[in-house]
Amino acid sequence: MSVDTATVKKVASLARIAISDSDAERLAPELNNILGWIEQLGEVDTSSVQPMTAVIPNTQRLRDDVVTEGGQRDAVLANAPQGEHGFFTVPKVVE
Amino acid sequence: MSESTYRIHGETGEWEVVVGLEVHAQVTSNAKLFSGASTAFGAEPNSQVSLIDAAMPGMLPVPNQECIRQAVRTGMALGAVINKWSRFDRKNYFYADLPQGYQISQLFHPLVGEGSLEISLDEKNPDAEVKTIGIERIHVEQDAGKLMHDQHPTRSYVDLNRAGVALMEIVSKPDMRSPQEAGAYLAKLRSIVRYVGSCDGNMDQGSMRADVNVSVRRPGEEFGTRTETKNVNSVRFVQQVVEIEAKRQVALIESGGKVVQETRLFDPDRGETRSMRSKEDAHDYRYFPDPDLLPLELDDAFLEACRESLPELPDAKRRRYESALGLSAYNAAVLTADADTARWFEALLAESVRVAGKSESELARPAANWLISDLFGALNKLGKDLDSSPVSPVQGAELLALAADGTLSGPLAKQVFEIMLETGESAPKIVEERGLKQTSDTGAIEAVIAEILAKNPNQLEQYRGGKEALFGFFVGQTMKAMQGKANPAVVNELLKKALG
Amino acid sequence: MSDLTELGVAGLRDGIRAGKFSAREVADQFIVKVSKAKALNAFLVETPDHAIAAARAADEAVAKGETLKPLAGVPIGMKDLFCTKGVETTAASHILEGFKPVYESTVSQNLWDAGAGMLGKLNMDQFAMGSSNETSYFGNVISPWRRGGGDNAPLAPGGSSGGSSAAVSAGLCPGATGTDTGGSIRQPAAFTGISGIKPTYGRCSRWGTIAFASSLDQAGPMARDVKDCAILLENMAGFDPKDSTSLNLPVPKWEDGLSADLRGKKIGIPKDYRLDGTPAEILNLWDAGVEWLKDAGAEIVEVSLPHTKYALPAYYIIAPAEASSNLARYDGVRYGLRDLPEGANLQDMYAATRAAGFGDEVKRRILIGTYVLSAGFYDAYFTQASKVRTLIARDFEIAFSQCDLLLTPTAPSAAFALGEKSADPLAMYLNDVFTVPSSLAGLPAMSVPGGLDGAGLPLGLQIIGKPLDEQGVLNAGLAIEQRAGFVARPEAWW
Ligand SMILES: [Mg+2]
Ligand SMILES: [Zn+2]
């Protein structure tokens, strides 16, 4: 699998990281190098193997249906870069 | 159901529409799916937000048992396979209403597998034309927050109160072939979740909304490319979307175009669907198992408890109303279509049994008739529903008992019911205080009849000359003179005697 | 007054208990030491008030004759990955600059509940991604160690818990918290001549710890010796209902259970860890370790972990994949940095914020993670890696049917110079070759110092245990510690 600059840009866009053309050109061989190395995994015969689901055997606990949190708007908004009237705000979205 | 007959008549021939629905139903629970914040509707912005819902660094989800239980019960009500082993996946995309940058959902191993439900397009005889619609799966997932665009000229406001509320996504198979079928499916599904109590079904509050997948094809051919119209929030709108989208696709194909697989939005004001370009590049969701959560493993005791807690479901109830209570197919269908109606009817019937001391099967028919024609009619006029009915099941039962034991004639009963609606008073009290009792006093009735015959010599002559239809005239005059209180049977008998 | 900063966790705890010195004296001395060690860049935030408050509480308890809490008056350093209420927490990233959590992580809360105080927040590789502490937005941590012979090249303290390793080895704090995703406690411990243990996955709650790769992240202590590690771990671990992956098990009394007597224990030596190109000094230390464990009564057996070579590539799929998703929340909406270029829409704002806020290594891993999860590649990469992970865990299971513990080197080299490997990401990744397999399997593992290389730099030995056998790991670590006679300390130049 070879990653070209167009792919790097596409992936960066999916990941919402702005990159310049020169960034993409620098990253392409770097990512290729890493992905090429990763691809040795393909050698392993895993046809009869299940993917790992829990690292240490453990079962999912479930919480009770009780309201334990809320009414803490100031704390929730305390670190917001921008907010007003109890809302977070973002550049206007056109849907 | 007979072969689908719904067709789009295009310029190049007939087209068949293929519909599948993905219904998002908000699970009834106190707290959210993965946090302890409240799900209550209509709170102050961001007042029902946990640190988890706001995706603060290091915050972790723990699933709410009630949300799992309700989804399992819903699956059971749809006769679906319950997967004892399921797990949560992350669906990754960036949007301001999605604080984590991913929605915790289920893709690879949903909680509920295949099931089905039956729809009917014949209201009068629901068992006559039945079609089974396949359910593909039900999975549990988080709802997103809410964006407001009209509060500020250049900013959108973000309210996370809904973020993290549990949804069931109920995915049908592409088994529907007309707008009517799609509407019937959604209505039936809504009925079932309301019976089960897993969702309140309030479509106008967004508790239930459908993504409508529509494609068209030549009858019998391969499926065409489908579009998905998001968040359609009423049965009527779903029907409109199917029709509009099918016609749009046919016109597009016939004019040489191609349907693209895309997400669309319904604009009810303009009666059209349009492409949602703003979400176009969000297609690669990079699903993978959520590493913050473990596989969900359900034991037999949990499943058994879910099964035991299921109520009688609408189809079973409808059939029982027909067979055990002797109701007409139509009445049984009307009374069981909604859980609230059935609950009200059963309360009315139970009270009737208590008040009148007769069996259910004897009392069911008049109770059903009164509920459907009288009470529904009255509520309709008042713009109210059963929840806000000014007449309670107990009061209804008292009224029916007075009609059944002859205390009230039909017209008198209607009159008393009118007064009940206005005053909220009980039927016995109204009858007692206003003297609205029916009378069978033959002396009084005979006196009135004699007076009426004397006042209407012409009619009397015609009647005796063979115009028997005038009998009704004399009954009416007598009843009117008796202010509706005379027992009609006695009036008939005495009139026949008097008229000779 | 004697130099109390020479004491470790146990020494300080016992001295305060015995009234030999006050907790306040301890706090004051460490606070001074921290403030004078700016050249190491180990601390991002200094919190003397926190340490003093804990000291005051300890001294009051002593005065009243109350039973002291397990860590009463012991000041520690807190890796900046742990959210601390009201104290800036950044994961060493620009994107979280200025972020003050309104909550306290479970691990740090457990430590405060045990009476410990905080000297400050420790520098680290950004979002715990790195093995040299060169990816911090707030500058490299400089190892207190230097090569002998007048070579003053600044060395890497290891990573990602590089601030922790530097601070403990320089004596700025008696112990510190670390986190380990693929070796981030063990490798920096080895680089700086201290001990560190990563417990079984699920022992320490992840709640309130900024996530890197959720299925791998585990907190653990870093300290001067094995006993101090046992004490700290006891007070960090514990069941937490707020973390779905937390193990609902009591915390053993690891300190009480310490014993260097390994009679009846079998130690496995995985032959697959004998990699080509491993320096002779490392192999020699490994051999010495074998002898020390034999001397402690253990029997040595050779075992095989045949999928070892696939551990790193599997890790570099799984960890970036999880990270790419875990780090999606840093979007400039609810906290942290927001970069809003003129006329930018929402999606532009995300891209600009994340471009400005994340460092190169973080971006690299997000891109790899995004790529391996993207349409068409998921099965070939992520599913295959998850299956290989199963095989790696199975390798360990089979090995542990033949032995109780495994002994390996911690890292394939001693500390390298800053800048030496930062240009080649792959070379950097290979640093974790010995630590990653046990991380993938969720096993407890620790590094203890074993000796010095020819340049006078510390080398570490790694002990890996069965799930939940932290005690066995600590005991073997203690046996090595007692026999290795490692007493070297970096000479203060800072
Ligand atoms: Mg959908
Ligand atoms: Zn959905």
Image (spheres, helix red, strand yellow):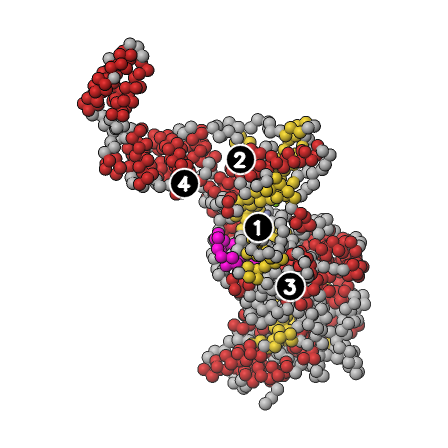
Nearest to N terminus: mark 4 or mark 2: 2
- The outermost residue toward the top is B465
Please give the residue where the numbered disc 4 appears in the rendered image: B384
Asked if the residue at tag 2 contacts the one at tag 4, i.e. Cβ–Cβ closer than 8 Å, the answer is: no
Point out which mark residue B184 bears: 2
Quadrant in which residue C112 is drawn: bottom right
Q: Main secondary structure of the magenta part?
A: loop
* Contact? badges 1 and 3 (CB < 8 Å): no
Q: Nearer the viewer, mark 4 or mark 2?
A: 4
Dot 2 falls on a residue whose secondary structure is: helix
- On whether residue B438 falls in the magenta region, the answer is no
The three-letter amino acid code for the residue at tag 3 is Arg
- For the point 51% across and 38% down, which residue is it? B187
Query: Would you place residue C358 above or below residue C258 in this image?
Result: above
What residue range appears in magenta?
Answer: B31-54
Q: Position of residue B123 (x, y in %)?
A: 48, 30
Find residue B285 and report its horizontal and vertical position in percent. 66, 51
Image quadrant occupied by the C terminus of chain B = top left
Considering the numbered disc 1 on the image, is that residue within a helix, a strand or a loop? Answer: strand
Front position among marks 1 and 3: 3
Q: Earlier in the sequence, mark 4 or mark 1?
A: 1
- Left or right? Give the position of C154 relative to B452: right
Chain ID at mark 3: C
* Above or below: residue C184 compared with residue B80: below
Q: Residue furthest bottom?
A: C1
Q: CA distance from mark 1 to mark 2?
A: 25 Å
